Image (cartoon, coloured by chain):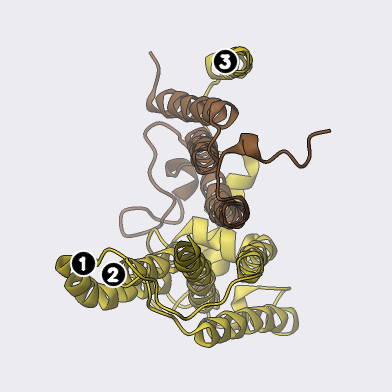
Amino acid sequence: MVKRFIALVLVLAVGGLFAVLLATYAPDAELNQTARYYAQRTAQDLGAANIVTAIIVTYRGLDTLGEVTVLFLAATIVGLVLSQGGQSGTPARGRVPVGELLTTGSRYLAPLILLLGVYVFVNGHLTPGGGFQGGAIIASGTLLLLLADPLRRFGHRLIAAVESVAGVVYVLIGLLGLILAGGFLDNRILPTGALGALFSAGAIPLIYVLIGLKVGAEVSSMLVSLAETDAETREEA
Amino acid sequence: MPGIAQLAMATGFLLILIGFYGALTRRNLLRMIVAFTVAGTGVNVVIVSIGYMHGRTAPILDATLAASDAAARIIDPLPQALVLTAIVIGVGITALMLAYALRLYSQKRTLDIGRFTELKG
């Protein structure tokens, strides 16, 4: 009871701070200097229609490379933590069978989800979306397959191969920018093309496809690791 | 008269507070993880709401938004780029927490945080 009271007091104190922030908040009427630079220069410098994409892939490309690395580390640690002590393979007993609807539905939906994911990351420089969103959609397809058949085993080798090839090519494209254009991860190693066309914005679509594959593979591998361990934990119980 | 930005910001702050309270009071590891996720979502909502500007459009150039007057007509793209990063990292953190929770469960057969007393002096 005392603990709950202390928690309530703490939360109220933080809430008070938030209330002050909210009461004194005045929205900007104009873009700040950095945002205005991005708004004015993106189209003519990089040829990307989606300014958020231009910021993530090119202006802040190094951050994004780091971010993908963090996600990779997270996926690796999840695999490492869950792989310790536990043998896989034997099917669990007494599992409630999944419904006919889910099994049949997932068979038809999974390719479409995959297609949507690819569409989202291929058009990342033109529409709201991009590599991370597309990768998450692909991983949701993996999740659907796992829900339909919890004992399905995905090829770890395939996931690892997609993940590492995408990562290596991403870094190589970044290094090419160092040689052919203005710096690391500069997208102008390819022609920027017409604004709004699918093949435009230099290397941005290429990089976003790689990020999409990488994120999709990483999140899928986390899901697969969790699902496999879940099956084992139930067996032991 | 509060605008949509203030409304979104208040919602985000509320989500953060709900998440904090849940993380402080729940005993079940899975519930704590859910609480952290709720708080993280609240932070993202707050950051996005800071970038919102009344009467402006999304930062995507197309037929109706020429590059020349983009600076006067788009909302701030920076918070959106930041939140995109934050969401992805949030997924990684959540997956890690779940993995540790699974490991702890497989060792102790419980998710009650009160039963994990190894670090108590």
Instruction: Report whether mark 2 lies on the same chain as mark 3.
Output: yes
Horizontal and vertical percent position of residue B74: 44, 44
Q: Earlier in the sequence, mark 2 or mark 3?
A: 3
At a point 64% along the width and 38% down the height, the residue shown is B115
At a point 53% along the width and 14% down the height, the residue shown is A23
Q: Would residue A196 be visible to someone looking at this image?
A: no
Q: Are marks 1 and 2 in contact (CB under 8 Å)?
A: yes
What is the chain letter for disc 1? Answer: A
Chain B visual colour:
brown
Q: Quadrant of the N terminus of chain A?
A: top right
> Disc 3 versus disc 1: distance between alpha carbons?
42 Å
Indicate the secondary structure of the residue bearing disc 3: helix
At a point 55% along the width and 78% down the height, the residue shown is A203
Horizontal and vertical percent position of residue A136: 44, 64
Q: Specify the label residue A148 is tagged with.
A: 2
Indicate the secondary structure of the residue bearing disc 2: helix
> Disc 2 versus disc 3: distance between alpha carbons?
42 Å
* Chain letter, colour yellow: A
B61 relative to A184, above or below: above
